[in-house]
Image (spheres, rainbow, N blue to C red):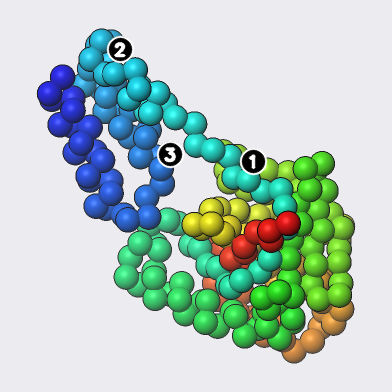
Amino acid sequence: MKKLVIMLGAVLVGTLSANAQFDLGSLFNKVKDVAKEVAGDAVDEYVPEELQELLGIAIPELEIPGTWSYLDVAVEFESADALTSAGGKVAAQTAEEKLKPYLEKVGIKPGAFRFTFLEDGTATTTLGSKTLKGTWSYNKEEERVTLGVGGKEFSVRMTENGEHINILFPADKLLELMKTLSSKSNNTTLVALGALAKGYDGMNLGFECEKVKE
């Protein structure tokens, strides 16, 4: 039992030390695997029921329904390892700084851009005075939303960011969304945004949003 506790503690400390922004679900799975490896069938005998429940805890589903208003640019590497490196953090910050002015030029600013997800699976995307109807569905395991906007579908990665959420698109799909929302699909801003998107293949680009309180 002492060996089990020590090893469980080592997994917790090692995981937390490796990355301050750890994935809670992955952490619990690692601890559970170590418990089974060390104790085998003795887990039921030596690990308190409360801890067993903790190790098997179900991570709450992201609460998507509601209206989410744009706050800032969000960037995520498709490879989680890239963002944890010093170079990855610099690249992400650079992408955010370059992307934000282009989004502002097409009207994406705090208070002017929002997504509304209804319980019945319908959705609206609003940019200024323009609102496009669509649909949404959530894949919990992949943390992805299939989002319909103006007759087009996008596979969107959606993750929690404290009390906010990040709504992220592959770089080329973000450009497609901007063209769908903009009435001037060939304007110079979108052309420049397209060139920028090509330089960030392998990144998800999008929006940090806060929930609008009703």
Observer-nearest of 132 and 46: 46
| Label 2 element class | helix
Q: CA distance from mark 1 to mark 2?
A: 32 Å
Give the amino acid at mark 1: Asn
Q: Kindly check if marks 1 and 3 are in contact, taking CB atoms under 8 A apart as contact.
A: no
Q: Position of residue 131 (x, y in %)?
A: 86, 66
Tell me the residue at 58%/39% (across/down): 61
Chain-order first, disc 2 or disc 3? 3
Number of residues whose C-alpha sits closer than 10 Å to that of mark 2, classed few (under 14), some (14–19) or many (20 or more): few
Give the amino acid at mark 3: Gly
Give the amino acid at mark 2: Asp
The residue tagged 3 is 25
Residue that sits furthest to the front in the current view: 214
Observer-nearest of 58 and 41: 58
Residue 12, compared with residue 82, is above or below; it is above
Is 19 displayed left or right of 99 in the figure? left
Which quadrant holds the N terminus? top left
Is 149 displayed left or right of 27 in the figure? right
Residue that sits furthest to the bottom in the current view: 188
Q: Which mark is residue 11?
A: none
The residue tagged 1 is 139
Q: Is residue 212 visible?
A: yes
Nearest-to-viewer mark from 1 and 2: 2
Number of residues whose C-alpha sits closer than 10 Å to that of mark 1, classed few (under 14), some (14–19) or many (20 or more): few
The residue tagged 2 is 44
Residue 206 location, quadrant: bottom right
